[in-house]
Image (cartoon, rainbow, N blue to C red):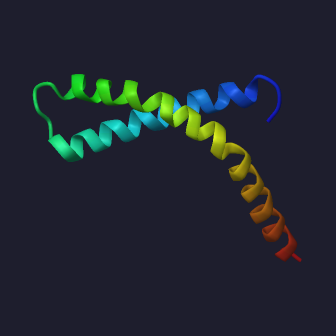
């Protein structure tokens, strides 16, 4: 990925992942108390920036690993 897309894509991907994971983990830890949504959103707002930074750092490694696996899989197809 090149240009601005290499920063924008991880922003949205991290947001979606942080939203889903914080909701799930909040539910696992608390069940469904009356302030569930508030607690979930507080966790999400704290998690998204960290998830974004992690996605920026991990993206190059994930891309290389993907290319490696795909090359191996395509190499075994004959």
Nearer to us in this view, 36 or 56? 56
Give residue 75's quadrant in the image: bottom right
Q: In this view, does 59 lie to the left or right of 16?
A: right
Residue drawn at point x = 10 percent, y = 26 percent: 34
Residue drawn at point x = 77 percent, y = 54 percent: 64
Give residue 18's quadrant in the image: top left
How far across and down, in percent of the image, does residue 35 sit?
15, 25
Up the image or down, 58 lies above or below 72; here it is above
Nearer to us in this view, 64 or 24? 64
Give residue 44's quadrant in the image: top left
Q: Is residue 53 left or right of residue 41?
A: right
Tag count in the figure?
0
How far across and down, in percent of the image, does residue 62 sit?
68, 51
In the rendered view of the protein, which quadrant contains the N terminus?
A: top right
Residue drawn at point x = 65 percent, y = 42 percent: 57
Up the image or down, 71 lies above or below 21; here it is below
Q: Is residue 53 left or right of residue 23?
A: right
How far across and down, in percent of the image, does residue 56 sit?
65, 37
Up the image or down, 59 lies above or below 39; here it is below
Up the image or down, 78 lies above or below 35; here it is below
In the rendered view of the protein, which quadrant contains the C terminus?
A: bottom right
Residue drawn at point x = 68 percent, y = 44 percent: 59
């Amino acid at each position: 990925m090149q240009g601005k897309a290499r920063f924008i894509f991880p922003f949205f991907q991290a947001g979606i992942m942080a939203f889903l994971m914080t909701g799930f983990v909040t539910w696992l830890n608390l069940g469904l108390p009356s302030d569930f949504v508030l607690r979930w959103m507080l966790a999400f707002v704290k998690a998204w920036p960290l998830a974004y930074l992690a996605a920026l750092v991990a993206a190059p490694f994930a891309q290389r690993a993907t290319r490696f696996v795909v090359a191996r899989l395509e190499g075994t197809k004959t």
